[in-house]
Each structure stands twice: as C-alpha cells, then as structure tokens.
Image (tube, helix red, strand yellow):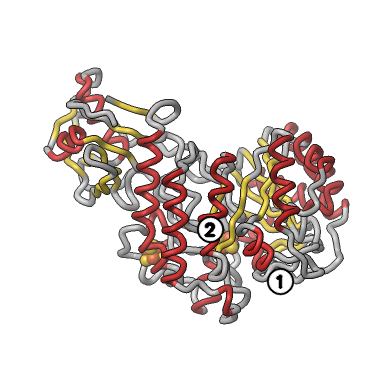
Amino acid sequence: MIISPHPIVLYDPDTWSAQSDCDCACPSAPPVPHPPLDRPLRLRSHPLLRHIPLNTEYSVAFVPSFSRVAVLNRAARTMLALPVELNNDQRDDQRDGMITLCYRLGLLTENDGALPLPPRPDTLSAWLHVTNACNLRCTYCYVAKSDEAMTEEIGLAAIDAVFRSALANDYRAVWLKYAGGEASLNLALVDRMQRHALGLGTRLGIAVHGKVLSNGTVLTTRRLQHIRDLGLGLMVSLDGMEAIHDQQRPTIAGRGSFRLALASLERALALGLCPDVSITVTGASVAGLPELLRWILPRDLPFSINFVRPLERGVSRQELQLDERRIIDGMRAAFAVIAENLPHRSLLGALLDRAHFGAAHERTCAAGQNYLVIDHQGRIATCQMELAHPVADLSTPDPLALIRADRSGVQNLPVDQKEGCRTCEWRYWCAGGCAVATYRATGRYDVRSPNCGIYTALYGDVLRLEGLRLLQQSTGRIRREE
Ligand code: SF4
Ligand code: SF4
C-alpha cells in the first residue's frame, strides 16, 4: 500500500462508455462531457459526498447518482474537506490539477449540482429473433417456442428496417443482437444478415456491431470460427456450475446442458473469442454464484449478473422467486469471491441487474427509446419479453418512431416518474429497475422495482468492490493522479 503525504486520486475514465454488455437493451453510449471550466470557481466538497473505507489509507468516494466513482487517499480527503478556489491561470499547478480533477469527477462542486447527463445514445440496438426454436427448456424462459425460424427474406428486411430507423434518427452505429430461441441454430441466416448489415453500414456511414446470444450447447468449432470470422461477439448463458445450471437450463429431453456450454466457452477462448457470460440469478441459483465466479474470473471473461424476470403478470414460479434475504446473502458471498479475484474491467455496470454507476441516467434500459425487437415473423416490439405485443412491422418506414410513440405496451419511464424513486439517493444510477419486471410484479410502470430492497442493500457493496479494483489496478489503464 502506497502511503503518500500528497493527494492521490484513482479513477477509471471508461466506466460508462465501455460498460459491460448485458442480455437485453444495453446500448453503448458516448463519453460523458466534463463540466465547464471557463471561469474562476469557488468549490467545496459535494454535500452528498460519501466515503467507504477500503483500508486505513484509502477510501472509495462518490456522490450517489451524481459523480464518478474514485478512490482517494487520506491527503486527498483532507484536501476535499476545505473550500477551495480554482483560477484559470493556475491550472498547471499540481494542487490545482488535483482540484480540477475532483471537480470533473463531481466530488467538488460549485453549486451542489450534478455532472452533465450523458449525451443521447448514438447507437441503436436491435434484438433479432432469428429463430423461435431452442433445444433447451430453461425454467424462466419467456419465449413461446416453436420450430419456426426467421426466413432470409424477413431477416434482410429486418436489417433494412433497423437501418431505416438508424438513418431517420441520426444514429451513428447499430448494435445487432442475434438471438432467439437458440440463434446458432440459424447461423446461416445470421451470416446473411450480418453481411447485409455491414454492406449497408459501409454505404450509409453507420458503424455495425453484432453479437450472437447463445445457450452454448450447439457451438461446434466450425460455428465458433464462423462467428469469429464474421467479426461477431458471443454471449453465452451460464447460471451456475453443473447441478445448478442443469436444474435451471435442461435440454428438451430433460438432460443437463452445463457440460456442453462449458466446452463451448473453452473452445471459444481457444479460438480467440472473448465470450460474455450472462448469468441469470433466481432464488434457486443464487447460492451457486460464488462457485460460478470462481470459474469465470480466472479466465478473465466479461460477465453480467441479471435477476430473473417474472414470466407473466402476477405469475412467478416458487423456485424462481427472489427471496430478498437469500439473494442479498448469496450476492454478498459472490462479491467476496470477486474481491479475491478482481477483474481489470469495471464492475459498475455488471453486478446488479440493470443498475449502472458509471454516469447518471434517467432510464433503466434502452427499451422504448433506442431499441427495436424484431421477431421471426417480422413483427416489431419494444422488449423481447413482450414479443406477443408488437407495435410495428417491417413495412413501417421508421419502426422506432412507433416504438417511441406507443403508450399501450411496455413503458420504460424516466426514474423521476416512478413512485418511491423520486427522492432515492441512487435514482440516477439505478433508474428504478426493469420496467417489465416491475409491471409484472405490481401492475404498474410508475413505481419502483420489486427488487429495490435488494438493490439498496447491495449498492454500497458494489461501490466498495469497484474501489478495491481501482486500488489494485492503480497502474495501467486506471488513471492515477498524484
Ligand atoms: S428502485 Fe429503489 S434503489 Fe432504485 S431508484 Fe427506485 S427507490 Fe432507488
Ligand atoms: S424492459 Fe427489462 S427486459 Fe425489457 S429490455 Fe429493458 S431491462 Fe430488458
């Protein structure tokens, strides 16, 4: 541990724009702008500034909902405790450089305000349901499966529709999630769609990113090479080690799928892919989370932890339910494993469902704003959990306009419109949780998440983990200012 009489501030500049990918509407966003520095400033520490001690010298510092997350040493905390003046002509001074940084991070403030909100996302995300077939029968799956696959005609028209909306709404990039069902069962179509998208992107000056979302059970070496050679990313679902995963994700025949998924992940790594692992946590699986993370973390795989969503309004099977105490205890046990194997990637958007501590944001996800879901028949919906309620089709000139205008289906409201959230200190990092999960549990969109008790119990733990990560990795990509 470095002990210095000089202030030390550690932070990660990329925690918002380089967020972990998730299993639904999580588009990348442009970097958050710095607050203006165009005049002399009288600054003081933000009145809501909080510190969580990491050891005797360092603490993680943040203003819930409003600042970036940073680690400070004792001298930096002392520096922040007193009001300071910052003059334009002193920027090169080391102390003023440190004060400028703390102002930019939102730890020092002139008028108790917040940092600027992130700019409007420049990426349109699309969930492309390339097949309605799947060889698994996961206990929490919301897809009414059949043998139907998306045809080439619909697939290409779906890509055209995504680009129409991207052009009409000035997006600079599209993020395509090839999903289903089991998307790799229709990899020939994924190939056609991705090549078509790349061609359109080149012609229209729109960047194209794509990822295959898979259960990992039929990813032969050939299919993995195909995914890699198309430049696609890969996300594989893994809910626990063998017994837990197999209980939650059995095959149609009732057999386990864990060994197949694990072998695919190992093969993907050997081929140079870096698959994301999507973990769905249920009441039945949370106890196995520590063991799963002991497998994931040494392999340096990106991962995201998501809470199971109720299947229908008011219906959630007993074993899937999120018993608050059990989930909190299980998540804390998982966090203890992470603390022993800290990853180099930021944890601020990966650990707790849709919460993201990288920057203030008003909505939990991109649904209803920057997201299209296109099913195998070409029907377009707001969220993949609401495939049965499409609001547009492939003939629509700008499907996103109809998604945004729709008031009959999923309403992904700004957090300030959610009862119980308006005065919550975490509101612009949490944004109130998944709209579908809230509606199915409560019958309302304008209330806080049914998982709120879990979130509020664990947010401090997530911030402490991020602090430990920053401290451990204070060389390299993490910026260290002294
Ligand atoms: S769901 Fe809970 S933690 Fe999240 S913003 Fe609402 S009140 Fe705060
Ligand atoms: S509403 Fe919920 S399930 Fe739908 S995209 Fe958003 S976070 Fe995901």
Q: Which residue is mark 1?
A: 388
Query: How far across and how far down the image is residue 231, in percent?
Result: 73, 35
The CA span between labels 1 and 2 is: 32 Å
User: Helix or strand or loop: what does disc 1 sit on?
Assistant: loop
384 to 214, vertically: above or below: below
390 to 225, vertically: above or below: below
Task: Name which residue type carries label 2.
Answer: Leu
Which quadrant of the frame does ligand 1 lie within?
bottom left
Instruction: Find residue 289 and name its label.
Output: 2
Residue 273 as seen in the image, left or right of residue 35? right
Task: Name which residue type carries label 1.
Answer: Ala
Residue 413 as seen in the image, left or right of residue 206? left
Among the 4 quarters of the image, the one containing residue 418: bottom left
Residue 130 as seen in the image, left or right of residue 442? right
Answer whether labels 1 and 2 touch (C-beta < 8 Å): no
Observer-nearest residue: 65 or 452? Answer: 452
At x 31%, y 35%, the residue is 104
For label 2, being within 8 Å of ligand 2 is answered: no
Q: Residue furthest bottom?
A: 314
Quarter containing the N terminus: top left
Whether residue 256 is visible here, answered yes or no, is yes
